[in-house]
Image: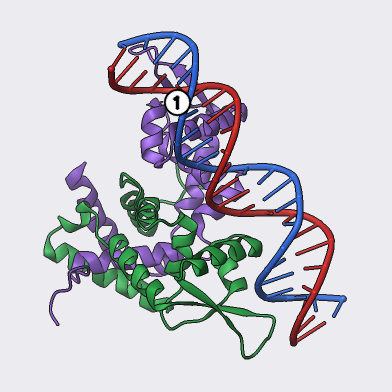
Chain colours: A green, B purple, C blue, D red
Amino acid sequence: MGVCATTRDDAATEAWKLLLELWWSERPPRFPAVAGEFGLSPMALGLLKSLEPGIELPMSTMAEWLFCDASNVTSMVDRLEARGLIERRDSPKDRRVKLLALTAEGETLRERALARLHEPPEALASLSMADQRVLRDTLRRALSAEG
Amino acid sequence: MGVCATTRDDAATEAWKLLLELWWSERPPRFPAVAGEFGLSPMALGLLKSLEPGIELPMSTMAEWLFCDASNVTSMVDRLEARGLIERRDSPKDRRVKLLALTAEGETLRERALARLHEPPEALASLSMADQRVLRDTLRRALSAEG
DNA sequence: TATTGTTATACTCTATAACTATA
DNA sequence: TATAGTTATAGAGTATAACAATA
């Protein structure tokens, strides 16, 4: 009994485990399913999701965020650019850097894909209004604290 | 103005969006990072995660849950079995079916990987105890309602 | 010298189709 | 006939290393 080296059972850990359960218990799994709906690999959807409208991001940063090699980002960007969803722009500050940005078409597709991802699971939607608001407000506090 | 066809802004949707933000804002992204720590592909970690200790699961079910082709499950199971983490068992009810189960070694690795996945993000851990408990209790209600 | 992104290449992962064995 | 899992194969995805351009 007592504290185990690899397991904590405080309320934050319990809440987090429940959140993951909510995410992972979906069948079919939401993320790859939605990627498939839009003819994207899961990683390509991750790239689009990470590219916010109006924001330009260096390819190297994208590689970090996607946890993959830079050469892989080159391949994905080649495909997404050929589909007209994103474009490469030259950085005004460093001529080695290429900045990624959504095209108008890319913004539209991203919006539709995010809308699918944002549909709350049944377990959440069937909570009482009071519980839904409590959940929303508490999570807002959590995310605003670290900005 | 008013209601858009593809976007809802009720509390459940807002809460779900915040929850996904919490999961996706982690850098490096938690799931592939943890898989790498244990020498597993993300899908292989997903397979182990889905295999609860003491539970036997048909390979066809695993293919559904992982959203991939049955032949791919065969490959993954070949590798995981060669590593001694899972085993194939004959179904007593249907001689075509192979049931997957964790080995003792597989249970240990799964436990350690889950412990890493279950570490709450900083944003959650730094919430007040009261907020943590509210979050936990509300999510428990959500998940228990559908069983 | 170090870094960004690309290329060439090989390796891993995944799906398709054909197959075996059961049902 | 239909289904569970395997095999052979091809295709997609990914990383490694060498490279060109720039810092």
Q: Quadrant of residue B12?
A: bottom left
Q: Position of residue B8 (x, y in %)?
A: 19, 69
Residue at left offset 45%, top offset 26%: B101
Q: Is residue A56 visible?
A: yes
Number of numbered discs visible in the structure rendering: 1
Q: Position of residue B52 (x, y in %)?
A: 41, 34
Residue at left offset 34%, top offset 52%: A30
What kind of residue is marked 1? Answer: Leu
Residue at left offset 34%, top offset 49%: A21
Subunit bearing disc 1: B
Which quadrant is the N terminus of chain A positioned in? Answer: top left
Which quadrant is the C terminus of chain A positioned in? Answer: bottom left
Residue at left offset 51%, top offset 76%: A87
What residue does disc 1 label? B100
Drawn side of residue B69 relative to residue A30, left or right? right
- Asked if residue A64 is positioned above or below residue B50 in the image, the reply reads below
Drawn side of residue B45 relative to residue B5, left or right? right
Q: Residues within 10 Å of mark 1 (few under 14, many from 20)?
A: many
Drawn side of residue A122 relative to residue A1, left or right? left
Drawn side of residue A127 relative to residue C5, left or right? left
Q: Residue furthest bottom?
A: A92
- Asked if residue B46 is positioned above or below residue B23 in the image, the reply reads above
Q: Position of residue A53 (x, y in %)?
A: 41, 79
- Asked if residue B66 is positioned above or below residue B85 in the image, the reply reads below
Q: Is residue A5 visible?
A: no
- Asked if residue A35 is positioned above or below residue B59 in the image, the reply reads below
Disc 1 secondary structure class: strand
